[in-house]
Amino acid sequence: MKKTFCYLFFLTVCALAFAAEPKKVNWSKLANYDESKIPEYTVPDALVAPESGFKAETAIEWYTFVRPEILKLMQRDQYGFMPPRPAKINFELREESDNALGGKAIRRQIRINLEDLGGKHHFDVLLYIPKKSPKPVPAIIGLNFGGNHTVTSEPEIFLCEKWMRNVSRPDMTSRLHKAFDWQRGKMASRWPVDKIIERGYAFATVYYGDIYPDYEYEDGSPDSIYQIFSKDSGFSSGPATIAWAWGNSRIFDCLETQPEIDKRKVAVTGHSRLGRTAVLTGALDTRFAAVLGNNAGEMGIALSRRVYGETVGLITGQFPYWFSPNLNKYAGKETELPLDRHQLAACIAPRLLYVAIAEGDKWGDPKGEFLGVYEASKVYKLFGSKKIPAMEDFKVGKQFIGDGMGFHVREGPHDMNHTDWGYYLDYLDANFKPRTK
Ligand code: GCU
């Protein structure tokens, strides 16, 4: 009797403990992956101003009357407004070597110090510049997920002291959310820095959590760049994606102080949530000459109205603090979204827009991404592009390079790897024409 009681007591405790544990939702299982189940939808015309209904017939008309309306509504209803440049910004050189990457590169580690009426914040740039290439050189910037020390294995790279996202080893040390020596170079498969340098490009990166910590399921804005702004500025808190985009713009400010960089040839890239951040950055900050959006998916390039793979409902359900709260009302009502991704992509025109996705990234919707590019190409055409993508150009393993726009679908899973970089560098070479000797 006593034994049975103990056993029942044990079972009750287990059941209560299990009930108290927050249930993990399998978001991917909630998605539609069946083309025949896509609801009927229309695609807003990228040439038409979403508020006034004005239809542009020339590039100048589009740039003057349509683009500003798209960007205003995109920020107000979807991503949140881009915070202003801070009142004070300075670039502190913390370390420099002219013998980095086996003698191929100059390395600089620069702290960007930010200050405004609400307080201070800083984040750290890791910059490599090819030594031999004639100056100035074009540059590529990209935020990283794991810390600057994970991008190359050089022991001189400072470990970030802020909250770190886990990389590669899911053990007790990674649960501490700290940067460790053993992580050096662990994300190098995403960043072939040697190759980038050999091809004549400078490369700059920042750990994204240094700008806005991505606590996943929790708002990181009190520990982010928003803390520099005063309460009455309207920017003392806000969503993550636009904050990361703001960070990209500050990296550009930093590159403007580096004499070896050709400021007319700077590309912004990133993978996944940081790929969509790259697209948003390029749409808003016209100093960037090129955008390379890697697996940017939902809210990046893939048409939201298609309701395939991740949707507005699924992304806002999982990561509500990534976007403006105004986006939530379209959860489950994606076909009613007033603005879709191709309109954001079009805001990069006539600058270079290259989009890549992995065939296996069904969650990110490869076809939806292609359609995003395809629909935005109307605007590129208005700017004079002759070679724009056609539906036949959507082929796995084949790169499309048009006038301004480019695209590839790589075989394999959701990632950014050396194959993607091969395509990216070929595309940039064709446009930026870097000199290696
Ligand atoms: C999740 C999220 C995506 C995001 C991805 C990533 O899968 O749903 O929207 O792109 O994480 O950034 O790795």
Image (cartoon, rainbow, N blue to C red):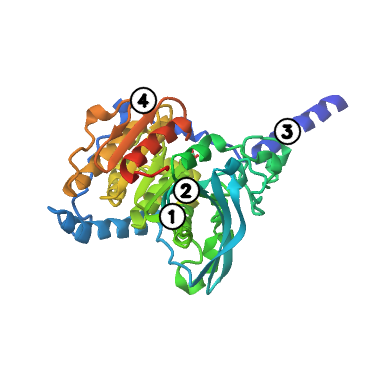
Q: Which residue is mark 4?
A: 397
Alpha carbons under labels 2 and 3: distance apart: 56 Å
* Residue 394 percent coordinates (x, y): 29, 29
Gap in Å between the C-alphas at discs 4 and 3?
A: 51 Å
Could you tell me how far apart the alpha carbons at marks 1 and 2 are, in whole angstroms?
7 Å
Give the mark, 2 or 3, whose residue is nearer the N terminus: 3
Q: Nearer the viewer, mark 1 or mark 3?
A: 1
Tag 1, which secondary structure? strand
Work out whether mark 1 precedes mark 2 in sequence or the reverse, and give the earlier one. Answer: 2
Badge 1 density bin: few <14, some 14–19, many ≥20, Cα 10 Å: many
The correct choice, above or below, for 378 with respect to 211 in the image is above
Badge 3 crowding class, 10 Å Cα cut-off, few under 14, some 14 to 19, many 20 or more, is: few
Q: Are marks 1 and 2 in contact (CB under 8 Å)?
A: yes
Secondary structure state at the residue bearing disc 2: strand
Reading the image, the residue beneath label 1 is: 261
The kind of residue on which mark 1 rests is Ile
Residue that mark 2 sits on = 202
